[in-house]
Image: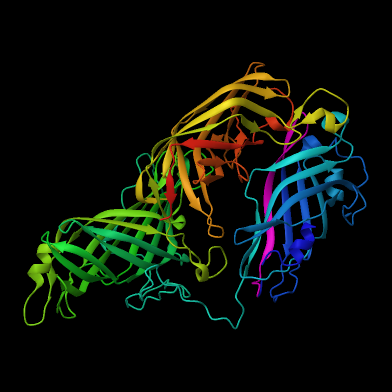
């Protein structure tokens, strides 16, 4: 049925760019009493073109598994393929692999309905000691799409059946959980050769000001070479000091970098007028043209440059405390005094691998540039003031910073967007007025040091249309209003924490259905204390935190073993997100460590595991639904949960107790007091 839905157009396409599907993935495969690390290579070809209503075929998909030597002796006998499996061309079939693969596009996903693959060992692998290599191939269902966007293939859990393994190993069935990236590949579904790209303006709907030839609709890439390209060499825009405790190596060679684009919106508070002027812009980037690394401390500094096209903004204020003043302000990116380049420099500090070893620093991004302000359209108490067309300031240094988080709050990256803040000194205006110098009047109202800037950047898009989001569907900047904010008590009763299916032994019967069940930790209740920010224009990242968590009356099943559940690593970070497709509000909680100490000596730790598979890192629960009308948090449909960690001290057999085994929360939490959460 899912194959029919996919091929009938449930997902979306038109013109498909050439791309290959291929990935090397690492799985942790668990039998009933042991775990093995298995590497899977998956490869397929994607056609270079397609049209509306025509199928997109991957061609024949090939799979190659590398199993450790410990499995060789148990996987040497032959067995029949299950019904519906595709037998490989080799005669020596030694197993089958069923891989969960999803196809997604613009937030919608469907099961790709890939069948089981028959596996055989090649002659060299069968004859020698060492890792066992199994391989096979087969056709998979085609895809027909009816809309634009990237179509992506992603692999999930794998079920591996090997012949010849004894009954203690579960009849040769292993449940495999991916421990590395699950992305197989993607293709860009364009709008067709006859469709012109749609121009996107900042959210003010005004036409951007003309700036040094900067293209504002993101359909062209920013220049990668001079003139108009490259990091700005001016010393006043040099990078900040490295985080304490890091020691990066030399700066890497200059490279073209990756073109990106983003919308920005915010405001500047004018201290003298006690008022705010809105700001909106389109920014084009060249991401990571240079970099420095410190592998020992999981640290990476990226060098990026940008060009900005700002929208003229109009604001109102009371001059001298009583005169209504209306003015239009135009912001232009300019070169530093005596400089030749108007490029803005952006530096970011982030982990080399967010899911690698813990990083002992807080991530941040730094934007450094110069801008010039031009004022026009001024009226005082309704009377227009003719300032002419030359009323402007000298170049103003702009030094803004965006918080990118840490292991406890969760981390974001430059391309995720975020809130840039800083203080700006506005110099005196010059050449204002025709026949009469009105510059002193403007300077008395606005020039000075008490000016605060806050700009929200949207997620960066890719004008080359090879990864999401792409610039013909640019996301808008996202902020939230939370009222009244403050402390929130959330309670779920009963609280159920559930492991993988077939991950525990109930000691009854001889067949799989009777003997192997889903492990659970069930508590009478769980109570979480949240501390949310309050006010308007709150960033989606780090909107709140979890400061306390308590569990009462907990037992582990099967066996009804009493458990002591406790939380550590507090506070945890709470981050908000709004679906671009549905508008639904969700929350993620990062920095999580849970421990469940059993009365039988089984001490389980829940968090996440590093990609190197050699240690525990903070866990994250994503996709928690927020029903703000009914004061409820829902774990239904949560896309990722927690894993059994390496610190676990539990000899109990079963796939639910080995490191990286996924566990998840089931149920809904009610919270109080009522919160009004809107965007913006």
Q: Is residue 297 above or below residue 19?
A: above
Q: Is residue 606 above or below residue 425?
A: above
Q: Residue at x 59, y 41 (%)?
A: 635
Q: Residue at x 35, y 69 (%)?
A: 308
Quadrant showing the C terminus? bottom left
- Along the line of sight, the residue nearer the viewer: 370 or 636: 636
Marker count (numbered): 0
- Along the line of sight, the residue nearer the viewer: 405 or 576: 576
Coordinates of residue 625 in the picture (x, y in percent): 55, 46
Q: On the picture, is 219 further left or further right than 515?
A: left
Coordinates of residue 603 in the picture (x, y in percent): 62, 22
Q: On the picture, is 182 further left or further right than 370?
A: right
Coordinates of residue 315 in the picture (x, y in percent): 25, 66
Query: Within the magenta stretch, is there residue 485?
Result: no
Magenta stretch, residue numbers: 15-37
Quadrant showing the N terminus? bottom right
The answer to whether residue 58 is visible is: no
The answer to whether residue 401 is visible is: yes
Query: Within the magenta stretch, is there residue 23?
Result: yes
- Along the line of sight, the residue nearer the viewer: 330 or 289: 330
Q: On the picture, is 134 further left or further right than 79?
A: left
Coordinates of residue 97 in the picture (x, y in percent): 80, 48
Residue 547 position by quadrant: top left
Residue 2 position by quadrant: bottom right
Q: Residue at x 31, y 64 (%)?
A: 279
| Magenta segment main secondary structure | strand
């Amino acid at each position: 049925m899912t194959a029919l839905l996919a091929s009938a157009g449930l997902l979306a396409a038109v013109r498909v760019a050439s791309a290959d599907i291929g990935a090397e993935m690492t799985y942790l495969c668990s039998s009933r009493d042991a775990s093995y690390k298995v590497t899977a290579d998956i490869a397929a070809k994607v056609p270079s073109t397609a049209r509306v209503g025509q199928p997109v075929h991957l061609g024949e998909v090939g799979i190659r598994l590398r199993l450790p030597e410990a499995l060789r002796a148990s996987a040497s006998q032959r067995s029949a393929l299950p019904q519906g499996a595709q037998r490989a061309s080799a005669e020596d079939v030694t197993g089958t692999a069923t891989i969960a693969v999803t196809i997604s596009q613009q937030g919608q996903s469907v099961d790709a309905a890939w069948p089981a693959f028959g596996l055989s060992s090649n002659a060299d692998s069968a004859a020698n000691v060492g890792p066992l290599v199994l391989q096979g191939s087969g056709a998979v269902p085609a895809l027909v799409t009816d809309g634009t966007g990237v179509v992506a293939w992603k692999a999930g859990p794998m079920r591996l059946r090997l012949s010849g393994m004894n009954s203690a190993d579960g009849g040769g069935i292993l449940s495999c959980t991916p421990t590395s990236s699950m992305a197989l590949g993607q293709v860009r579904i364009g709008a067709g050769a006859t469709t012109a790209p749609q121009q996107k303006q900042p959210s003010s709907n005004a036409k951007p000001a003309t700036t040094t030839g900067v293209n504002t609709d993101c359909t062209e890439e920013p220049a990668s070479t001079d003139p108009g390209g490259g990091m700005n060499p001016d010393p006043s825009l040099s990078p900040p000091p490295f985080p304490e405790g890091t020691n990066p190596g030399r700066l890497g060679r200059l490279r073209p970098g990756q073109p990106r684009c983003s919308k920005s919106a915010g405001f500047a508070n004018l201290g003298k007028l006690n008022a705010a002027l809105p700001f909106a812009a389109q920014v084009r980037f060249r991401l990571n043209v240079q970099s420095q690394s410190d592998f020992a401390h999981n640290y990476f500094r990226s060098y990026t440059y940008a060009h900005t096209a700002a929208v003229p903004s109009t604001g109102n204020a009371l001059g001298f405390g009583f005169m209504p003043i209306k003015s239009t302000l135009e912001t232009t990116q300019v070169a530093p005094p005596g400089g030749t380049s108007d490029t803005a420099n952006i530096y970011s500090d982030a982990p080399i691998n967010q899911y690698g070893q813990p990083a002992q620093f807080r991530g941040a991004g730094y934007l450094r540039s110069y801008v010039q302000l031009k004022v026009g359209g001024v009226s005082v108490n309704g009377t227009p003031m003719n300032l002419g067309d030359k009323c402007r300031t000298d170049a103003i240094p702009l030094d803004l910073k965006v918080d990118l988080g840490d292991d406890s709050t969760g981390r974001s990256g430059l391309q995720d967007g975020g809130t840039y803040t800083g203080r700006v000194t506005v110099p005196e205006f010059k050449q204002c007025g025709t026949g009469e110098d009105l510059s002193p009047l403007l300077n008395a109202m606005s020039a000075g040091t008490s000016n605060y800037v806050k700009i929200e950047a949207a997620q960066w898009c890719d004008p080359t249309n090879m990864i999401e989001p792409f610039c013909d569907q640019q996301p808008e900047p996202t902020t939230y209003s939370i009222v009244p904010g403050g402390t929130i008590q959330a309670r779920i009763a009963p609280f159920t924490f559930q492991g993988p299916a077939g991950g525990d032994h109930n000691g009854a019967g001889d067949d799989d259905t009777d003997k192997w069940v889903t492990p659970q930790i069930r508590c009478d209740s769980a109570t979480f204390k949240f501390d949310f920010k309050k006010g308007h224009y709150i960033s989606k990242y780090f909107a709140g935190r979890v400061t306390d968590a308590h569990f009462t009356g907990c037992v582990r099943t099967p066996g009804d073993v009493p458990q002591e559940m406790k939380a550590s690593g507090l506070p945890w970070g709470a981050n908000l997100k709004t679906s671009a497709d549905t508008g639904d509000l969700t929350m993620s909680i990062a920095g999580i460590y849970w421990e469940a100490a059993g009365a039988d000596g089984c001490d389980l730790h829940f968090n996440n595991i590093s990609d190197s598979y050699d240690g525990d890192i903070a866990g994250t629960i994503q996709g928690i639904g927020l029903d703000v009308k009914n004061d409820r948090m829902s774990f239904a449909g949560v896309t990722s949960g927690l894993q059994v960690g390496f610190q676990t001290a539990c000899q109990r057999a079963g796939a639910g107790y080995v490191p990286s085994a996924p566990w998840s929360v089931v149920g809904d939490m009610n919270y109080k007091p009522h919160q009004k959460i809107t965007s913006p």
